[in-house]
Amino acid sequence: MIILPEEIKYIDDKPANGIIVDWKKVFAYYDKLKVPKGIYNPSKELNPTEAEWFVLISSRSTGKTTNLLLIGVILFLMYGITTPYIRQRPDMTARQNIEKLFEVIRACGYIQALTNGEYNNVYYFGHKMYLCYIDENGNRARRSEAFLYALDLTQNEVYKSSLNMPTGDFCIFDEFISSAYANNEFIILCDLLKTILRDRLTGKIFLLANTTNYYNEYLRELYIQDEVLKVAEDEPFIKLTKKKTRIFVHLISNRNKQRAKVNTLYFGFDNPKLASITGGSWAVDSYPHFFRDEERELVSKDFYIIYAGKILQLDYYISPTLGEHIFVHDAVKINEKARRIYTVGEISDRKQAYKFGSLPIDKRIWKLYNANKWYYYNNDIGFTVDTYVNKANKL
């Protein structure tokens, strides 16, 4: 099999609008590779014309990153379209990490198959990945133009003046669910995507992650958090934002029968945080919930946190069982009698306190947080508080 370059056609015959892709042909080439069953198959489960953003989430080792990178190679060979591969930090785009992404692709001979032997390997240099041919002596005899650019969010400002990707339409943001996020990270990602895509109309943005934590900033920023928690595996849906951006969301099941045996042998423990390893559900952080205590006495309901578009009310209690403790729940609005309002935004009211405040009562309240004496109406609220604290600590 050899992929011949396609005749390049542009939307409205204008190169600035982007290259028109025949996705049926792309997937036909992919199918000819006869990728093993039991993993994610984009040719059967993806229609790139349905949306611009694609959120693909699964347990580990379902093949979503590997197979999308294969699609990226095919797009390059057909149209010269390149893949911006995005990660959060510089260490994530180090040579050993990027080259590891292509281990399966190299081992299965897919590059050689797609190019009819013109290339048989990949070569990573200067944060760019090239197709190359390694001869019998182990020498690199030839290489292609770069087909993948490894980028990280911390360099966003640098990229504005140095990055030029006129065909960088196949964007992959890998491992977007993380244990820590930069301030305004979603905005930084969108800013980087604007630098990459410019004014083209043909970009496709893929967000890939494992089911490590449902309570994360990206799902919330995309306004799909509630839907993702409720949706069943392999029942993809399309979310249309208020401003008409289309987001395709797919919670991918584990199709590997061998994995079920391995899970039973080694990971059959009743711990929800193992879900991203074993598959089948989210690895959910569990926060202490409020419970009935007849001897509990309410001290104050006049403390609030404003964060991520939410108002959280802090009820200050004392009881013989727990002593001083806080119950955190949603609030529709802030009471006129509010005593303290914690925020990481601009201070516009004398009742507001930046981050954790500095008064004795502030120290008392946050000392209870550090002592694990805060209780929550649900896990989402617990996650919001933790995210607030993490952001405040970075400022």
Image (cartoon, rainbow, N blue to C red):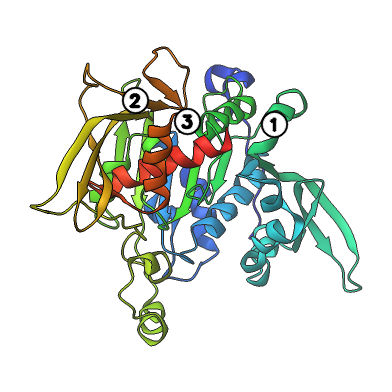
Q: Callout 3, which amino acid?
A: Lys
> Residue 147 at x, y = what percent?
70, 45
- Label 1 crowding class (10 Å Cα cut-off): few <14, some 14-19, many 20+? some
| Mark 2, residue position | 340
Q: Residue at x 76, y 46 (%)?
A: 128
Residue 146 is left or right of residue 53, and the answer is right
Location of the C terminus (image quadrant): top right
Q: In this view, does 71 lie above or below 332?
A: below
Q: Callout 1, which amino acid?
A: Met
Please tell me in which quadrant of the rendered image residue 13 appears: top right
Q: Of 284 and 122, which appears nearest the observer? A: 284
Residue 393 is left or right of residue 263, and the answer is right
Residue furthest to the left = 294
| Mark 3, residue position | 355
Q: Residue at x 70, y 35 (%)?
A: 155
- Label 2 crowding class (10 Å Cα cut-off): few <14, some 14-19, many 20+? many
Q: Can residue 164 be seen in this view?
A: no
Q: Of 18 and 64, which appears nearest the observer? A: 64
Q: Residue at x 66, y 72 (%)?
A: 107
Question: What numbered label is drawn on residue 165?
Answer: 1
Q: Nearer the viewer, mark 3 or mark 1?
A: 3
Question: What numbered label is drawn on residue 87?
Answer: none
Sequence-wise, the earlier of marks 1 and 2 is 1
- Label 3 crowding class (10 Å Cα cut-off): few <14, some 14-19, many 20+? some
Q: Is residue 295 above or below residue 259?
A: above
Q: Is residue 117 visible?
A: yes
Q: Callout 2, which amino acid?
A: Arg
Residue 198 is left or right of residue 209, and the answer is right
